[in-house]
Amino acid sequence: MKLNQKLIALFVSSLLSFSVPAAEWVLTADVNPSVEYNDNVFMSEDEQSSVHYVISPTVSISHALDNMASSLDFGYKIDRYISLSDLDTENPFIQFRTNFQTERSAWGLDTSYTEDSTRTDAADDTGDFTTQSIVTTKYISPSYSHQLTERDSISISASYSERQYSTTDYSDNETKSLTTAWQHQYTERWNGGVSVSVSNYKSAGINDSSENDNYNLSLTSAYELSELWNLSGQIGVRQLKSEQLDRFGNTEKNTNSGSSFNLTANKRTELDSLTIGISRSLSPSSTGEVNEQQGINLNWSRELSETLTASLSTRYQETTSASDDGDEKRENINFSPSIRWQFERNLGLNFSYNYRQQKRADEEDVDSNAVMLTLNYDWDGLRASR
């Protein structure tokens, strides 16, 4: 708890240090409690069901000037399982963001501290929904961009993240990355450019350790197809150099090359919003490997009336090891329709259904069905000027 208090004090002092001119401060808070029933909590052949309650009391402090904005969010995520009390957790989180702009330049900073269950991101990480471990993540990312001419701009961003786990089922790790990009506005509707990124991922477990370097070169583009449709994305090539060291001192080195892309199409009308995306990228795993993930996702929403909004989110993802000797494939499917009833200006209910399926080689397919009800309350907050 002392660590959390020190972090909050540090972020608040940082926030205040950016605020020399007079400004309006905004204080808001939300809870948004939810209740869920899941018929296969662990996504396993031995199905276990439970009612699950989640509440995340969050306090947000923000302020904005003509050329600057800052925000601080902190709180707790509290999980309670009626039939599986061993999964109960109380995890803190805190995030600070700020950006500063001049006529031709912009600086940004994003930093956070979170504690969460590894089961939360299991589909994107190891596919293991059964192991209960708490991961502590520290993250910081500064960025800078500059407008060279009316049509040309450059940018550079860096990031550092550190993850530590409460059990030895996973390997503590750190990731460092650096990205530079150039962009040119060819027409009012079309811009394009080049992006170069380098990242380093180190992992240390009780039996082995690994270090991975990833190099990526991409072409980027965005095009306004019409008043309704927008297309954007990047296509490139990447190279991964990996080195694994086991507990006996044996070293294994691998080099792997491939393609990477992230393409998105957006459509927005007066009542509808639609996003379709396909992607392929590398993602470090908490077991020390680097995975290659490719998939497709669709998100759609429609305003049925002034108070009712229907939504649909679906995703298919295929995960394989990026190393030369990794041929095991995992497939994850997620399908989630929902409907939101906004019966008051700042008060509403969201009812959703979530279907998940996971397929692994040489294992039985597993799936789960869950229904969730969430109360959404948007407090107007408090405002003060100085």
Image (cartoon, rainbow, N blue to C red):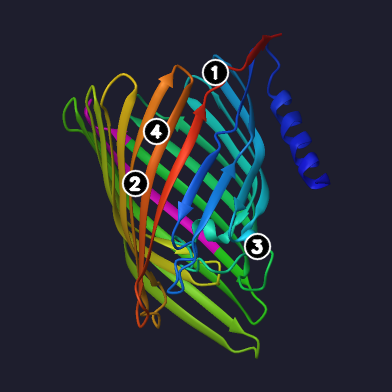
Residue 320 quadrant = bottom left
Rendering coords of residue 271 (x, y %): 24, 25
The residue sitting at 51% across, 51% down in the picture is 178
N-terminal label among 4 and 2? 4
Residue that badge 2 annotates: 194
- What are the residue bounds of the magenta stretch? 184-200
Q: Are marks 4 and 1 in contact (CB under 8 Å)?
A: no
Question: Which circle, 2 or 1, is nearer the viewer?
Answer: 1
The residue sitting at 42% across, 35% down in the picture is 350
User: How many C-alpha atoms fall within 10 Å of the one at disc 4: few (<14), some, or many (≥20)?
Assistant: some
N-terminal label among 3 and 4? 3
The kind of residue tagged 1 is Asn
> Which element carries disc 1, helix, strand or loop?
loop
Residue 238 in view of the camera? no
Question: Which circle, 3 or 1, is nearer the viewer?
Answer: 3
The kind of residue tagged 4 is Ser
When the figure is inspected, residue 180 is found, relative to residue 120, above or below; the finding is: above
Find out whether residue 195 is within the magenta segment.
yes
Horizontal relation, residue 168 to residue 357: left or right: right
N-terminal label among 3 and 1? 1
The kind of residue tagged 3 is Asp
Rendering coords of residue 183 (x, y %): 34, 37
Give the CA distance from mark 3 to mark 2.
Answer: 49 Å
The kind of residue tagged 2 is Val
Give the CA distance from mark 3 to mark 4.
Answer: 52 Å
Residue that badge 1 annotates: 67
Rendering coords of residue 139 (x, y %): 62, 48
Q: Which mark is residue 54?
A: none
Rendering coords of residue 99 (x, y %): 56, 28
Q: Are marks 3 and 4 in contact (CB under 8 Å)?
A: no
Residue that badge 4 annotates: 153
